[in-house]
Image (tube, helix red, strand yellow):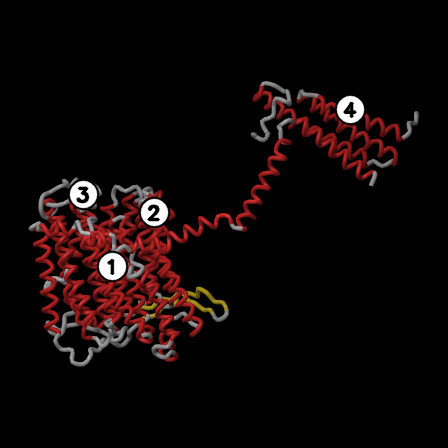
Amino acid sequence: MLSVPIETQIMFAGILFFLGLVGVLVRRNLVFMLMSIEVMFNSAGLVFIIAARHWNQPDGQVMFIFILAVTAVEVAIGLALILQIYHHYKTLDVDAINKLKDNK
Amino acid sequence: METFIALIPAIPLFSFLILALFGKKLSRKVAGFIGAGSVGVVALLTLIVAAEFFKSLPGIKSYSVVLWEWINAGNLKVNIAFRLDALSLVFAFVVTFVGFLIHLYSIGFMAKDEGFTRFFAYMNLFVASMLILVLADNILLMYLGWEGVGLCSYLLIGFWYKVPANGYAARKAFIITRIGDTAMIIGIFILFLNFGTFNIQEMMQLASENWVAGSSVAVLTAALLLGGALGKSAQLPLQTWLPDAMAGPSPVSALIHAATMVTAGVYLVARTHVLFSLAPIVQSAIAVIGALTLLIAGFSALTQHDLKRILAYSTISQIGYMFLALGVGAWSAAVFHFMIHAFFKALLFLGAGIVILVLHEEHDIFKMGGLRKKMPVVFITFLIGAASLSALPLITAGFYSKDEILWYAFSSPKGSLLLWIAGIVGAFLTALYSFRMIFITFYGKAKTEPAFKAGKLMTVPLMVLAVLSLIGGFVEMPDSFGNIHPFSDLIENTLPAIVLKAGASQELLFQLLSAIIALTGIYLAYLLYFKKSAFAESFSQTWIYKFFYKGWGFDKLYDSLFVKPIVWLAEIDKNDFIDWWSIGLSRLTLFVNRLISPTQNGKLRWYLMSFVIGIALILTYMIYK
């Protein structure tokens, strides 16, 4: 089995996380922002898997299943909100949805 | 018996709670029934209690009932406890009986008012507080009732609160009586510090044993308690609130500002009479204050245009008589005049209420006139009330009560010729202004048409009170005429009897004089205001008339003496260092707010970016620490 050093593995997870973060910051469409958040979640999950394999402990895999469940819930709520926002504003542009600001 | 005594204040309190909590759900009929009915039940209970009380006389002179412990902290022990003796019985009788008649009248009077249940809730609370005041066993519970009636007076003067002037009058009444009450509570504290109890009987007992007559502590305490009495009873120098208190509905003026609450001062002085006997200077001051007040208010009543203000000044003047009687030690005469005054003054206010109501809220007597034929029942009862007020000899109750005071003002050891002269001049003024009111309001040409006829609910209480104003006096007839006095016999179970000074025996002569004075006053009123003499017209143009009309300028005096300096002081003190501090604090907050609020721009990605920068900074710090 091909053995990849752990530093490379974590670096890979870090790149994934950074890509997700950039996606959240630069995308203006709410759906894409949600997707980018998923990427960030997955990179965090990946670190758990890497750690589990490194120390031969199953806890990290348990944690990953846990994260999976949480992201599923988060996506459900996030999509429901996005649907409502679309109904209300007829757009998904996050810069257009800025009613929560100081009225000065 | 004990249960009944406890129920007397409890029932109106209970019906107040019902009306206050569920008032919105009750129909007017039910609310009126509860409001008036509860006071009716209490009036009945008082009669039963009175019957029991008379049966046990002279063996048992007072009944006490302890309900529960109110305050218990170290030395401070106060009970919710009631005590019924002859004095509180008379007051409770007047409060419940006259109160019931006024409640009945109010059902008719307030029928179209939007605040109907609110009115009855306040009125019931008032009756409950007043009964607590007169039945309280200790002075602290009495003070509770005392402040309770003050609160109700405030609420009911400002009952029609949509007119700003009414709210102003209510605040004025509240603040001025509060000046007296502050003095009174200090007096109560002095009593407690000295005797370690709030129980009135024990206090009086200890005071008479431990304090020397005329000692400075006795004089100080009596003077402080007198302050409370002066404020509540609208006597000099705290009398200015009562004429303005007429802003309330007429039944309120009848019940609170004529029959019961304003006489609470009389009750307080009579209840703590031991103290005042220990402070002869203060007691003489009471007589002088009473005499001055009755003259000042009498002259003012003579010049008023507003029907209710005439009656208000007349009330101040009549309470002046009661204070005069208290001051010369004629305790029973003061209580007697209180009772008779409650009858005829309630009658006059209720009659005035009908007149004002059917003439579309017209208060000015010079715009009335000719009402004699239009409303005969009101006219006849009002005439009886005015006759009783002006002490028409022999047939009216007012004659017997006022004549007794006048006689004692001269013949008591504390009395003097000067006090008697003040009283007799006051009696002359009373007759004059009473019949000026009658002649201008009910005779002459009709100037305003009555809108409707008053119903039975409003006229029957008038008739009952008119009968009482006539026959009420026969429970106490002077030695020279009739010589029957069950009333003073009753009162003397609680308060000491008066001792005449030696050589005072010409009572009949004094009575004849006061009778002649009253009749002269009425005749002069007939000449001036029925025959319309030119003098009455020209007199109303003089400066002295205007001086009397303004209530001897007391309002203006207090305004420039107290109100204006305080307002001025507040004006120049707007920028002291405490203000700098608080203003600086608010400025700082505003500055920081302006600084930070632009960051809340509503852009989600902006927020996220600041998160990321923040996390990056924290991580950097943690790694390179």
**At 24% from the left edge and 49% from the top edge, which residue is drawn?**
B250
| Residues marked 4 and 1, same chain | no
Element type at marker 1?
A: helix
**Mark number displayed over residue B167:** 2
| Residue B260 appears in the rendering | yes
The residue wearing badge 1 is: B316
| Residue nearest the viewer, comparing B417 with B311 | B417
> How far separated are the C-alphas under marks 1 and 3?
27 Å
Residue B407 position within the rendered picture, expressed as x and y whole percent measured from the top left: 17, 71
- The reply, left or right, for residue B499 in relation to residue B592 is left
Looking at the picture, does residue A41 appear above or below residue B137? above
In the image, which is nearer the foreground, mark 4 or mark 1?
1
> How far separated are the C-alphas under marks 4 and 1?
91 Å
The crowd level at tag 3 (other Cα within 10 Å; few <14, some 14-19, many 20+) is some
**Mark number displayed over residue A19:** 4
Q: Which amino acid does label 4 sit on?
A: Leu
The number of numbered discs placed on residues in the rendered structure image is 4
Q: What residue type is labelled 3?
A: Val
